[in-house]
């Protein structure tokens, strides 16, 4: 049996993994000006870097918004498109080893998929995600370099940007500790530092996604959320999501290959 290639094709960034005998091999990502260039560049680089012959590839599985631009088989290899929400769930389940969870795919926006064993249902989403972070950073910080924004945020203090419960109440409110956020950006001043602004932007995006995922679980018995996508690489995740866990009594999980879960899920979808 040959290798199955899973490819998550974005508008400018493509992620690719190989699945051989049920094991993920050497995931990579490529950025290019358009999805087709990104796809073929990623595919060629993946084969080259891993010394894989084209004849060894049994099947190519595509997913992601950019997959719609691909009309033919990739390099003549049999190619199929996988439902992106199913790919999200399959990849998250494979990497986290959790069968009952809400998969939170933090891309340009954010989608929520309820995964309960082999039952995978897209339950909604919000227009807050990496695109929001980059757009606000361009306007407020004059940069769209997410690494620069994250580095600035590490030096900032979000308490100078956000209003906390302790700022408006002399004692904790029911279920809300004094350090919980009461209002995002409510304390921001017109002379706020770039570091504080960056901290505020990242906290706003991650807190909103976390709170929305908890709301998506209301009315269910699901208390586990598996986070996937590029935003999981932000170091601020290690601070913000544990705080949300305490606030909402849930569990947020970031698997090893969190940024590649959709590509992994696309490869896994071949067997389905």
Image: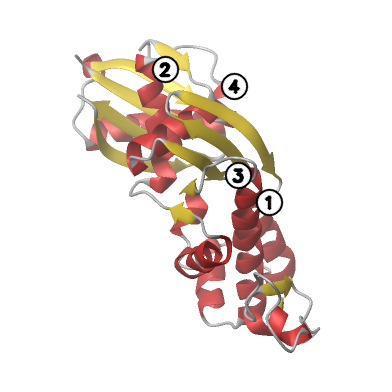
Q: Nearer the viewer, mark 1 or mark 2?
A: 1
Instruction: Check disc 4 and report the residue beneath it.
Output: 68
Q: Would you say the residues marked 1 and 2 are in contact, meaning their CB atoms lie under 8 Å apart? A: no
Alpha carbon of mark 1 to alpha carbon of mark 2: how far? 32 Å
Q: Based on the displayed image, in which of its 4 quarters is residue 122 positioned?
A: top right
Q: Nearer the viewer, mark 2 or mark 4?
A: 4
Question: Could you say where residue 75 lies in the image, as x and y percent from the top left?
Answer: 38, 16
Question: Could you say where residue 57 lies in the image, as x and y percent from the top left?
Answer: 27, 18
Q: Would you say the residues marked 1 and 3 are in contact, meaning their CB atoms lie under 8 Å apart? A: no
Helix, strand or loop at label 3? It is: loop
Q: Which residue is depicted at the point 60% across and 44% down?
A: 217
Q: Which residue is depicted at the point 42% across and 17% down?
A: 74
Instruction: Check disc 2 and report the residue beneath it.
Output: 74
Helix, strand or loop at label 1? It is: loop
Helix, strand or loop at label 4? It is: helix
178 sits left or right of 1 in the view: right
Q: Earlier along the polypeptide chain: callout 4 or callout 3?
A: 4
Question: Could you say where residue 99 lies in the image, as x and y percent from the top left?
Answer: 40, 35
Q: Earlier along the polypeptide chain: callout 1 or callout 2?
A: 2
Compare residues 44 and 10 and report the one nearer the observer.
10
267 sits left or right of 66 in the view: left
Q: Earlier along the polypeptide chain: callout 1 or callout 3?
A: 1
Q: Nearer the viewer, mark 1 or mark 3?
A: 3
Residue 6: in sight, yes or no?
Answer: yes
Instruction: Check disc 3 and report the residue beneath it.
Output: 217
Alpha carbon of mark 1 to alpha carbon of mark 3: how far? 18 Å
Question: Could you say where residue 71 lies in the image, as x and y percent from the top left?
Answer: 55, 14
Q: Which residue is depicted at the point 49% across and 24% down?
A: 119
Instruction: Check disc 1 and report the residue beneath it.
Output: 128
Question: What's the coloring here?
Answer: secondary structure
């Amino acid at each position: 049996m040959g290798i199955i290639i899973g490819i998550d094709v974005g508008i400018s960034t493509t992620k690719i993994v190989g699945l051989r005998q049920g094991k993920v091999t050497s995931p990579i990502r490529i950025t290019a000006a358009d999805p087709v260039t990104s796809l073929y560049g990623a595919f060629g680089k993946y084969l080259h870097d891993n010394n894989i012959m084209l004849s060894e590839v049994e099947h190519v599985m595509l997913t992601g918004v950019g997959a719609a631009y691909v009309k033919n088989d990739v390099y003549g290899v049999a190619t199929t498109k996988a439902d992106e929400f199913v790919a999200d769930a399959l990849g998250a389940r494979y990497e986290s080893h959790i069968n009952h969870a809400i998969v939170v795919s933090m891309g340009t926006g954010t989608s929520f998929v309820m995964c309960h064993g082999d039952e995978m249902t897209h339950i909604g989403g919000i227009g807050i995600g990496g695109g929001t972070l980059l757009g606000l950073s361009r306007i407020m910080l004059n940069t769209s370099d997410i690494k620069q924004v994250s580095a600035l945020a590490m030096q900032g203090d979000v308490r100078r940007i956000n209003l906390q419960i302790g700022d408006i109440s002399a004692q904790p409110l029911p279920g809300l500790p004094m350090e919980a956020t009461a209002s995002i950006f409510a304390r921001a001043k017109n002379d706020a530092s770039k570091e504080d602004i960056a901290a505020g932007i990242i906290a706003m995006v991650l807190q909103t996604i976390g709170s929305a995922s908890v709301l998506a679980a209301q009315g269910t018995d699901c208390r586990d959320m598996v986070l996937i996508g590029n935003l999981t690489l932000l170091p601020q995740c290690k601070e913000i999501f544990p705080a949300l866990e305490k606030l909402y009594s849930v569990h947020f999980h970031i698997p090893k290959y969190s940024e590649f879960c959709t590509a992994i899920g696309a490869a896994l979808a071949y067997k389905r």
